Amino acid sequence: QVQLVESGGGLVQAGESLRLSCAASGGISSTYAVGWFRQAPGKEREFVGAISWSSFTSRYAGSVKGRFAISRDNAKTTVYLQMNSLKPEDTAVYYCAATSLPYIPTITAAYQYWGQGTQVTVSS
């Protein structure tokens, strides 16, 4: 069973940076990609970005492109979300998720494994 554990959330001011980590364990070799989603209060969970374990493919939401970057470590057990130039509207609970589909989907239903989430709060 694939397990995902996020860490690195916290409170920052607008314009600052934060890096989230997603530690993967279990049958991670059965998955193709790991993605990041976020959910603000009263809103639906939305796609932020994702990367394939091979690192050959990545995809980002338009709202974060150029500010956020996803990478993974060489051991292919941890995926990072580097968030720069943070804005108050980036405030949300951030989740990592893994998919076994052979491409990078952007909808939540396409991801089979989920972490518990980590809170990111950006003050103005």
Image: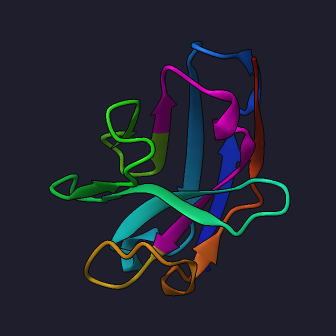
Q: Nearer the viewer, residue 10 or 27?
A: 10
Q: Is residue 8 visible?
A: no
- Residue 112, position in %: x, y? 56, 83
What are the residue bounds of the magenta stretch? 81-98
Q: Is residue 94 visible?
A: yes
Instruction: Check residue 93 for magenta coloring.
Output: yes
Residue in view at x 44 percent, y 77 percent: 99
Q: Identify the image quadrant of the C terminus.
A: top right
Foreground residue, 120 or 5?
Answer: 120
- Based on the displayed image, in which of its 4 quarters is residue 32 positioned? bottom left
Q: Position of residue 102 (x, y in %)?
A: 26, 82
> Count of labels shown?
0
Q: Position of residue 37 (x, y in %)?
A: 58, 59
- Please identify the residue farthest to the left as the structure is shown: 56
What's the residue at 49%, 70% (across, down)? 98
Residue in view at x 61 percent, y 27 percent: 87
Residue 78 rendering spot, x and y as whole percentages: 48, 46
Using the image as rendered, state which of residue 103 and residue 21 is in the foreground. Answer: 103
Residue 79 located left or right of residue 62: right
Q: Which quarter of the rendered picture does the N terminus lie within? A: bottom right
